[in-house]
Amino acid sequence: MWTTFDFSGRAAGLSAGLGAIYVGERQANTANSFVLPSYVRWDANVAYRFGAGQRYKLQLALQNLGNKRYYDSGGAFVPTYPGAPRTVLASFAMAL
């Protein structure tokens, strides 16, 4: 689930978003010998579009806001793969 708010007026071009990713309980390996627990991960972002026709976009995204420990998946040889800790991503995009 994700929601974004686009500002207007003097802040036109600015947007902020917040979302949650839910992953349910699931088998952790091919033998189905143990289960990984469910988790919810909260993410957020702030973006600014600018230039002629808002052609350019700067964005800052935060993943795993609560720095929660969770497991993405399991495997046949390595029992579990932990999810990433709090992560900050910056990006620049240009529409052609």
Image (cartoon, rainbow, N blue to C red):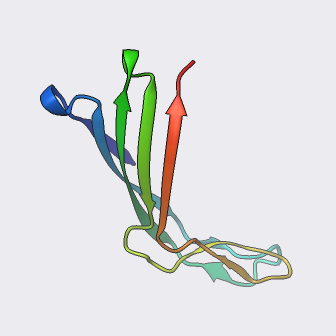
Residue found at the far right of this picture: 77
> Considering depth in this image, is 56 or 7 the residue closer to the camera?
56
Q: Image quadrant of residue 64?
A: bottom left
In percent of width and height, residue 94 lies at 53, 28
Residue found at the far left of this picture: 9
> Considering depth in this image, is 15 or 43 the residue closer to the camera?
15
Q: Is residue 87 left or right of residue 79?
A: left
> Considering depth in this image, is 24 or 3 the residue closer to the camera?
3
Q: Image quadrant of residue 7?
A: top left
Q: Is 74 rendered above or below residue 11?
A: below
In percent of width and height, residue 48 lies at 34, 37
Q: Is 26 rendered above or below residue 92?
A: below
At a point 44% along the width and 65% down the height, the residue shown is 41
Q: Is residue 96 left or right of residue 13?
A: right
At a point 51% along the width and 72% down the height, the residue shown is 38
At a point 42% along the width and 44% down the height, the residue shown is 59
Residue found at the far front of this picture: 51
At a point 80% along the width and 82% down the height, the residue shown is 78
Q: Quadrant of the C terminus?
A: top right
Q: Is residue 37 left or right of residue 20?
A: right
In percent of width and height, residue 90 lies at 48, 52
